[in-house]
Image (tube, grey):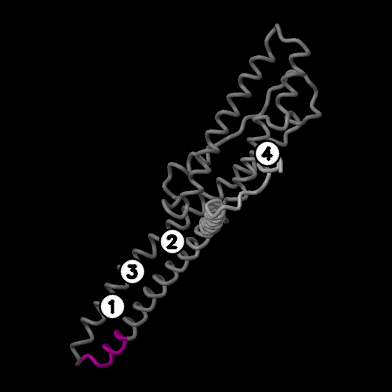
Amino acid sequence: MTQGDTTNEPDLTPGAANGRSVQQARRRALARLRLVRMALPLVDGRWAAYRRSIVTAVSYGLLGLAFVLGVIWFFWPENSRWEPAVNSLTLVAGLTGIFVERLTAEAERRTEVLRAVADELRDNTRLLNDERFSPQAPTSRQVYPRLVVSAVDLALVSGALGLHRDAELVGLLHRWRDTVHLFNRRLDLTEISTFSNTVSQADLAAFHRALHRENSYFAATRQMLENLLSRLPPA
């Protein structure tokens, strides 16, 4: 057997087998963690809606019970225990009603913010589909449309997105915001260069090719936008 044949043989030692089994177990654990991470926003959203439903049902139940006891107390006023029972139930129902109002307001504000972000992202998709970004566009001087992030900025500073269930979304929005600023800045530099008096037709064609190559910043921005739209939770 030659030295080349020896080096091509697979390593069948116990240490190598253990190393491969450890790597396989690590890959399986990472795959499970990714599945759990993807499921967490859905579970958190369902729990938030379930919590609001429970608190609302408890509040209306206490108010209904207080009303029934109040009616009974009206017809049988000789029992002095009705008054503290009615007052206590009304007080507890009022306190839980405060939590219902707070949870409802938070949910409505989050829904409005997510809708605004979704609308803005769809507007940015239409801007990226503008004919000036088309590969068939003429290689002439162009004033390109700019992407907007006003709704994303509002979502990040409003506090409407939860710290736990929206943590991944907040990270995506931060990266999208940075990407848009860099994208618009590159368009500024491109326009400054192409509108220069010394630029030639060959230079314009080079700028056009650089904008539409497969690994261009334009392609990366479009891919990030599509990914963000797919990860945006329903409002």
Q: CA distance from mark 3 to mark 2?
A: 12 Å
Give the total number of marks visible in the rendering: 4
In the rendered image, which residue does mark 1 sit on? 89
- The local crowd at label 2, few if under 14, some if 14 to 19, many if 20 or more residues have their Cα within 10 Å, is some
Q: Quadrant of residue 197?
A: top right
Q: Which residues are magenta?
A: 69-78
Magenta: main secondary structure equals helix
Give the mark, 2 or 4, whose residue is nearer the N terminus: 4
Q: Quadrant of residue 76?
A: bottom left
In the rendered image, which residue does mark 4 sit on? 3
Residue type marked 1: Leu
SS of the residue at dot 3? helix
The residue positioned 34% from the left and 82% from the top of the image is 65
Q: Which of label 4 and label 1 is nearer to you?
A: 4
Answer left or right for 169 relative to 134: left
Residue type marked 3: Thr
SS of the residue at dot 4? helix
Label for residue 104? 2
Q: Quadrant of the N terminus?
A: top right
